[in-house]
Image: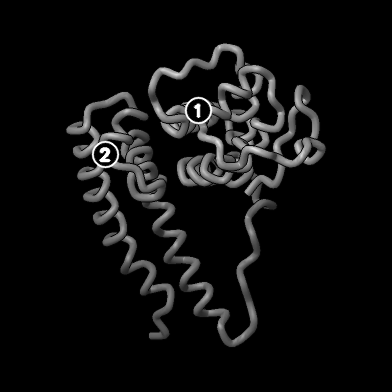
Amino acid sequence: MPTALRSAETGDLRSVPPAVRDDASDCNLMAAIRDGDHAAYRILVQRHLGRAFGLARRLSGDAAEAEDVAQDVFLQIWRRRASWSDDGAQFTTWLYRAVVNRVIDHRRRPRNDHIDAVPEPAVGGPDAVDRLHRRQVADRLRQAQEKLPQQQKIAVALYYFQGLSAPEVASIMDASVVAVEALLKRARQNLRQSLKASAQTVRDSFDDG
């Protein structure tokens, strides 16, 4: 997870004086940020950067890309602070929508994946095979999620991994609750089919016969 937010406008966040309004609501923090309050900005970053990063990583499948997305989203909060308007929606609704849109933008860019970035397989030690097994199973699940259509992937990430309700997901995705529930149903079906097809492959990988 990102440990700090780089910003040419605000400087190093570690230089900002200790926060004095840690219990302030997101709405009040944004009102202060709109007036240029650096301390309020730091509180907001500390409160929500991990959530933004987690969602971005779930959608992109790449930690470096997720960090870029989270950084970009929070930098835009500061740069566009003067235009912030409290329209009654929760800040997290806006945040998740911004993360989703930024991930989509990143997905449209050309990707350069290098073989050097692929980690070496674990070897040695009594638990090496067990670790490799768990890793392969987890990889299968991630691969199954990666194969989901984009809208299904977004709905799954928000509903199952961010713990949002269907109405909240619908608000973020600018869709109806019925549409979100249909996306989730199709996503579950697709995941089951994909995992069922790969289960035998995983077992075959550890078949001594």
Q: Dot 2 corresponds to which residue?
A: 166
Q: Residues within 10 Å of mark 2 (few under 14, many from 20)?
A: some
Q: Secondary structure at mark 1?
A: helix
Residue 32 quadrant: top right
Question: Residue at 53% of width from left, 16% of height from top?
Answer: 84
Residue visible at 41% across and 59% down?
A: 140
What's the residue type where badge 2 is placed? Ala
Asked whether residue 104 appears in the rendered view, the answer is no
Residue 199 pos. (x, y %): 32, 66
Q: Quadrant of the C terminus?
A: bottom left
Residue shown at 58%/34% (left/top)?
69
* Residue 26: x %, y % from top left: 51, 32
Residue position for label 1: 27
Q: Position of residue 200 (x, y in %)?
A: 31, 69
Tell whether 82 sits left or right of 98.
right
Q: With 93 as the anchor, is 159 left or right in this view?
A: left
How far apart marks 2 and 1 lie (CA) works out to 23 Å
Q: Secondary structure at mark 2?
A: helix
Label 1 CA crowd tier, 10 Å (few <14, some 14–19, many 20+):
some
